[in-house]
Image: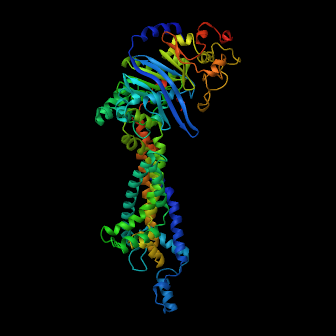
Amino acid sequence: MTMTSTAETSAGRTAACPVVLRVEGLDVDIRTPAGTVRAVSNAGFEARAGQTLALLGESGCGKSMTAKAVAGLLDPVAHVAGGSAELEGRDLLRMTPKQRRKVAGAELGIVFQDALTALNPVYPVGVQLGEAFRIHHGASAARAREQAVQLMRRVGIPEPESRVNAYPHQFSGGMRQRILIAMAVALSPRLLIADEPTTALDVTVQAQIMDLLRSLREEGDMAVVLITHDLAVVAEEADDVVVMYAGTVAEQGPVGQVFANPRHPYTKGLLESVPVDAERGSSLASIPGSPPELKNIPAGCVYQDRCPLAQAVCRQERPVLREVAPGRRAACHFSDSLATASTLEEIQP
Amino acid sequence: MLSYLRKRIISSALPLLVVIVGVFALARLTGNPASLYLPLNATEQMRADFTARHGLDQPLLVQMADYFGGVLQLDFGTSLRTGESAATMALRAFPATLQLAATTMVLAILLAVIVGSWAALKPNGIADRISSFVSMAAASIPDFWLAIVGIWIFAITLGWVPTSGVTGAAAWVLPIGTLVMRPFGALVQVVRGAMVSALSEPYIKLARSKGASQTRVVTHHALRNASAPALTVAGDLTVGLVNGAVVVETIFGWPGIGKLMIDSILQRDFAVLQACVLLTAVAIFVLNIVIDLLYALLDPRVRPASAVSRARKARPAPAPVETAPANA
């Protein structure tokens, strides 16, 4: 991980690239038998053309929910309770279902996590790849098929002319993921949301898929929102990162700066839990405890129960997400002290 | 395809044999036909002659061997009642049953797909509750009761349709209205369940992410996937109907195979009964093959080996780097 160099280049590029997606104050509620809980609270970020923004966090932190809310694909039990998500100036969250369908696929593409369940098992991949052209361009079946073959070639599937008629179960996991990616970029959308696109794949295939996503992003000058729990993927692929915890944004900023000098104890804890030159047999660093359940989010800071820095103020007052450096925001009462301290222990009062 | 057919025939042969032997023996337990066909004051000699003429004095095993010998030469015996060939009688009655079964199933499937899908759009919504109540009622009403109430209301009180027979389109209304209830009720439940699970699959989200309309999502993406479980149940229900809707055919005087079977049992017309059983068994055998083929058509994952290998031939080996199974 060459963080300093990434930090410089991304900071230099960021200003020049136009914002494609601007999410502000996004709240998502889930109805449960026990009542309504807030799954995402006041999430906000910007995704820029030609760049990758990573939503980073543990399972259940709300990163997927945030992306689904933006994409309009929330499950029936969840709904957007507030905020906005502007795709090139138009608020996706205030669109009618019909306007939404016009945007879906054409301007906003999504790559799903598990390609085996995301592909419809009963249709040949060519039909599914061509579907976007039929829906948005009114293409004929033959024309859609041609486009499908081209897409398959573009994402590196060998012999697309014969395989266009094959069914999803006749492809390997990596090839299925390529097909999903091809579907998402079919109409050259401005924004691509990739929801853990490599989690179900083995490591060598993961790298190929990330390479493919990167080259497609550069080709189409797309903004990519990458949802992941993998710190290494974030370090390698993303320009900016949004670290989420218990439905809130803990910290955000250019990846190089955030990883080199985290301004939230949760980010710091995550980074310290990555084994670096660990001795065999030595215990691995981890963050004690587990995230709070959504129905028991404490008053004050959401991270207080696991935070080594937690003080009385953390139990009473929820820290607001504020600018801690140019282009960087963090939600911690002690983010300024974190900037200068090299270990968490130094901050103890 | 040929090896598949051979397998099907071999696996069906034994059950078919057991059924025929069972019917053969059970029918003869009902008693000697002589007491039905001869006048009450017939002499012992006349009875013995009748029994001997029809080979009924032979031991059961000999009768059975005779029968199977005949079957192998496509001789299915003659009716005691009419002296006609039993096979001709069964074949003549069969189209009436098939028409009834086909119309009933087409209607039941169409209605069930519409109602079941409608219910599945919003599980536990108002549409779902109504359809659940209606389908449950339809599946549980006994057909003899429904037939009689139907005749009373629509044929006798209102006089809209005839009470029985096959004269004109109106005569079809009551038998089909009665027969359609159970398949409709059962299929609504199956279609609803299959659609609820199909609509919650990730591929539905993928379709929506491509901008597919609700109609397209339901009819193109979900329904095709939900059709396989519905087909299984529809197949079983069709088998029941092809077997002769015995009660309904009898009540409405429908000249189908069910009515012929009942008449043959009551008349101890063994050859005709056996011909009917054999014919329906063959029909069910063919129906099962058709269902298997439909299954393969609907779901590419269950296509027989030959079809898959054909697809494989068209498909090149995957790129070398991808050969490792990806966490599958």
Relative placement, left or right, of A177 versus A219 is right
Front residue (pair B305, A266): A266
* Above or below: residue A254 compared with residue A144: above
**Residue B169, percent from left and from top:** 31, 67
> As drawn, which residue projects farthest toward the right?
A281
Q: Relative to A15, is A318 on the left or the right?
A: right
Q: Quadrant of residue B247?
A: bottom left
Q: Is residue B217 visible?
A: yes
* Mark count: 0
**Residue drawn at (52%, 82%) of the image:** B32
Q: Is residue A296 above or below residue A300?
A: below
Q: Residue at x 50, y 85 (%)?
A: B35
Residue A116: give x, y in percent of width and height.
48, 34
* Percent x, y of residue B212: 37, 36
Display coloring: rainbow
**Is B224 situated above or below B46?**
above
Residue A64, percent across and down?
50, 28
Report if residue B318 is visible in the image: no
Q: Assign the C terminus of chain A to one quadrant of the image.
A: top right
Vertical order, B94 against A325 (above or below): below
Which of B290/A264 is in front?
A264
Viewport quadrant of the N terminus of chain A: top right
Please report the residue visible at 48 percent of the width from the left and 64 percent of the height from the top.
B141
Q: Toward the viewer: B188 or A117?
A: B188
Nearest the eye: B248 or A299: A299
